[in-house]
Image (tube, helix red, strand yellow):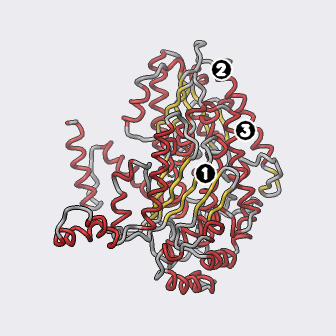
Amino acid sequence: MVRISEIPSWLKLVEHHSKISKLNLNEIFGSNRIEKLIFEEENILVDFSKNHITEETLELLVSLAKELQLEKKIEMMFAGERINFTESRPALHIALRNLSNYPIKVDGVNVMPKVNAVLLKMKLFTESIQDGTWCGFDGERITDIVHIGIGGSDLGPRLICDALEEYRNKNLKVHFVSNVDGLDIHATLKCLNPKTTLFIIASKSFTTPETLINANTAKEWFLKHTGANENAIAKHFVAISTNEEACFKFGIPKENMFTFWDWVGGRFSLWSSIGLVISLYLGFDNFTKLLAGAHKIDTHFRSTTFEKNLPILLALLTIWYNNFWNYLTYAIIPYDLRLRLLPDYLQQLIMESNGKRINSEGKVIDYCSSPIVWGRIGTDSQHSFFQLLHQGTQIVPLIFVGVAKPSHNLSHHHDVLIANMIAQSEALMCGKSSNEVYDELSQRNLTREEIEKILPHKIFPGNRPSTTIFLRELNPETLGSLLAIFEHKVFVEGTIWDINPFDQWGVELGKELAKKVLNQIEAGKVDENQNLSTQKLLLYYLKNKENL
Ligand code: F6P
């Protein structure tokens, strides 16, 4: 097969880059950019205009996507083909939110009846917790839900419950436990009443050590503090998994299991029964609205021309900076506290999906795949790392995410917050020239020498790109749409880089070695046939752990 970096549209982009990289963003900024590069949908506006792109750039990037058969690959995904080619599975998260209920087939069988049956089970369970028909073992109502899971079985539900807290069921509190650090579960359990607590054990595989260790600790704690027998577990533990047998072994009865399927990737699973905690906390209607928001984007993604297709444009922009400008990181900065967990969630979605180096033919690729994604809430981040973004030597494209309607009455606060977001994108692009700095300093009572000394430090080079995603308001539907946009962006990028965004073999080796290391810790004996650094670290730990 031809190498991607040698196909005509890639080569044209290389040539185009050498021309456009000489131009300053401010120079290419004409009024027609607003029409061409700002997209306004029903509830969302995406401003691409402050990026190093012109109409020609977009045409070339779209040609690249076409040349690499993106259209066909999108259809393959929606048709349930085995696009997860290393695990020979479809990637059908779109079926989980297919509220139009059109048939989606895997091996000729429509999966929608199964999807709908699980949704119905989630709805009934949610109602029974809410109206109190489901109680604890001695008849008390459930007041607290503890969701135990990690990675894709944690980050999505955690983000949504946090972001949409204003929609919550006031009679329930939710807690998330993911880390195997005992502090996590200890801090959670110490303020709970076991008789009114429901544990959700969320694990696609039901073999993830962190989750199973936490689940076992929760079970022991429950039995110890209630004095109840094992039968009581049925009223306090439910499981979400594709592995029924393992759930049963853990002690969770079949009727307390909410299933999903191997064609749902962990980090794409919040729309499945993994989202049960969302339904319990926010209500099933709001969970449905979340699905509806994502479904809207699925339709947009599948049917909108590439030139106006939001996930595709965002993906192409990432490819443009990553592969042609050599900008190897980008940051996501939400200007809304409700979205404070968005960077965490996106780090897994993006980097676990596309942090790969082997293509569909099993060859090492000769171009960069996923950039490093990072970020933090604004305005706090302005007072930590924005210095580097404005005046450092590395260029980091940014994605700002803002919400026009605040969730509180302190409108002045919101005005200031949003003013900062808009101002940052402007400052990054426009910068401050030496003339401007000179004029400013001249107003002060400084000597020429003093001015010359300080002047270079006060220059902002500008010409630094950013994209702004603005939501009209944050509600279950718009949040569903936002996350689905990023999911499809990830798929498009993986498709263009010819890697598989749906596996995650890269997390396995560390897990295997952790088992070996743990065996030595438990035996109190260090294996002398391993590298000296590991031996030294183990000895240090064994010597000092009791002193804690
Ligand atoms: O980090 C690896 C990973 O496999 C993720 O992809 C997944 O979301 C997470 O672990 C948890 O896995 P599980 O849901 O099987 O417990």
Dividing the image into 4 quarters, which one contains the C terminus? top left
**Which residue is at 64% across, 29% downward?**
253
Q: Position of residue 7 (x, y in %)?
A: 62, 85
Query: Viewer-proximal residue, 545 or 382?
Result: 382
Determine whether the residue tagged by mark 3 lies in a helix, strand or loop.
helix
Image position of 481 (left or right of 148): right
In the image, residue 519 sits, relative to residue 390, either above or below, namely above
Disc 3 packing (10 Å; few <14; some 14–19; many ≥20): some
Tell me the amino acid under the disc marked 1.
Leu
In the rendering, which numbered label is found on residue 134?
2
Disc 2 packing (10 Å; few <14; some 14–19; many ≥20): some
Image position of 369 (left or right of 452): right
What's the CA distance linking mark 1 and mark 2? 32 Å
Name the residue carrying label 3: 118
What's the CA distance linking mark 3 and mark 1? 22 Å
In the rendering, which numbered label is found on residue 301?
none
**Which residue is at 81% across, 51% downward?**
110
Name the residue carrying label 1: 483
Circles 3, 2 touching at the beta carbon (< 8 Å): no
